[in-house]
């Protein structure tokens, strides 16, 4: 059985007061809860890790630098993230790719840096609207997988999140058939490249406008093992029903 994971990406939202949501979320988790990871902004990582201790909730960062240390003003290394008590890091989010000019080769290096620090990398891929409209989605996904995934992925160190860019923060989601098509394609690609023992065990998340009212449908897809949730992860009252839908899928 693959592990199920509900990951919340708070993006550039939240201050210390927001950590109360972790306590509320804990109280709302179902008994059969899947893995739950909250990725707050970097200044909250340490306090979030402390607040999440013994809650069953894990903490992740939203990005890391590819180098261990050095003259990189404003950047944060994977080792620093691990030092806060965090266990995961998102790499290659489309907002980083677009706003910080990150490319597949950067994402690959960041994933490798994450592993070296003992973190699980949540590697993001996803097509733009023009790619979708030009019927290029699977080509784009194949290219991102080939370029962004290092050679030594394992089910323990890697999660892949498919986030169509046009679905992020828009309230638009692909049809279930479109989600199934991409997730089945990703699964077949990673099984081919890494073998069934690894490729069949890596969790695949869907991300982009996942909400309490659409989560159960999305989780019907056999190769959707969870979600990477933005806006609806900010409030425990919104995130908890998504987690429950995943637990019951
Ligand atoms: P939304 O759930 O707000 O669409 O964000 C998705 C996302 O980008 C998560 O990483």
Image: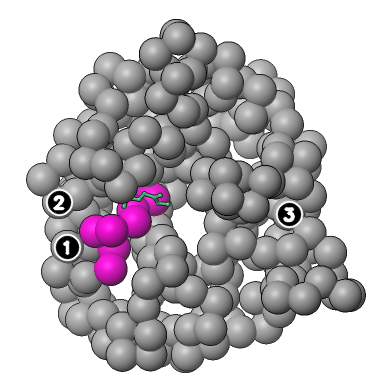
Residue annotated with mark 1? 238
Badge number at residue 48? none
Magenta-tinted stretch: 224-234
The reply to whether callout 1 and callout 2 are in contact (CB within 8 Å) is: yes
Looking at the image, residue 175 sits to the left or right of residue 122; the answer is left
Looking at the image, residue 41 sits to the left or right of residue 8; the answer is right
Residue annotated with mark 3? 110
The mark that comes first in sequence, 1 or 2, is: 2
* Magenta segment includes 54: no
Q: Secondary structure at mark 1?
A: helix
The answer to whether residue 99 is seen in the rendering is: yes
Q: Secondary structure at mark 3?
A: helix
Residue 156 lies, in percent from the top left, at 61, 53
Q: Taking 223 as reference, is 44 above or below it?
A: below
Residue 196 is drawn in which quadrant?
top right
* Residue in the image at 27% along x and 42% along y: 170
Residue 95 lies, in percent from the top left, at 51, 49
Q: Taking 48 as reference, is 214 above or below it?
A: above
Badge number at residue 212? 2
Residue 197 lies, in percent from the top left, at 63, 33
Badge 2 residue CB within 8 Å of ligand 1: no
Q: CA distance from mark 3 to mark 2?
A: 31 Å
The reply to whether callout 3 and callout 2 are in contact (CB within 8 Å) is: no
């Amino acid at each position: 059985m693959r592990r199920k994971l509900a990951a919340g990406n708070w993006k550039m939202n939240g201050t210390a007061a927001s950590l109360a949501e972790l306590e509320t979320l804990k109280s709302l988790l179902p008994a059969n809860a899947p893995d739950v990871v909250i990725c707050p902004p970097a200044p909250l990582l340490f306090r979030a890790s402390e607040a999440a201790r013994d809650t069953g909730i894990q903490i992740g960062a939203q990005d890391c630098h590819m180098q261990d240390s050095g003259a990189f003003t404003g950047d944060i290394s994977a080792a620093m993230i691990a030092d806060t008590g965090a266990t995961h890091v998102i790499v290659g989010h489309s907002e980083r790719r677009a706003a910080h000019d990150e490319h597949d080769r950067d994402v690959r290096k960041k994933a490798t840096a994450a592993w070296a620090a003992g973190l699980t990398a949540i590697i993001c891929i996803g097509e733009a609207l023009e790619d979708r409209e030009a019927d290029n989605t699977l080509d784009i996904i194949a290219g991102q997988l080939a370029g962004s995934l290092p050679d030594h992925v394992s089910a323990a160190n890697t999660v892949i999140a498919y986030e169509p860019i046009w679905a992020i923060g828009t309230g638009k989601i692909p049809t279930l058939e479109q989600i199934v098509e991409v997730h089945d394609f990703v699964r077949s690609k990673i099984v081919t490249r890494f073998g069934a023992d690894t490729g069949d065990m890596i969790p695949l998340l869907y991300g982009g406008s996942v909400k309490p009212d659409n989560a159960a449908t999305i989780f019907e897809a056999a190769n959707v093992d969870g979600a990477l949730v933005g806006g609806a992860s900010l409030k425990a009252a919104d995130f908890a029903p998504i987690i429950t839908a995943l637990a019951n899928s």
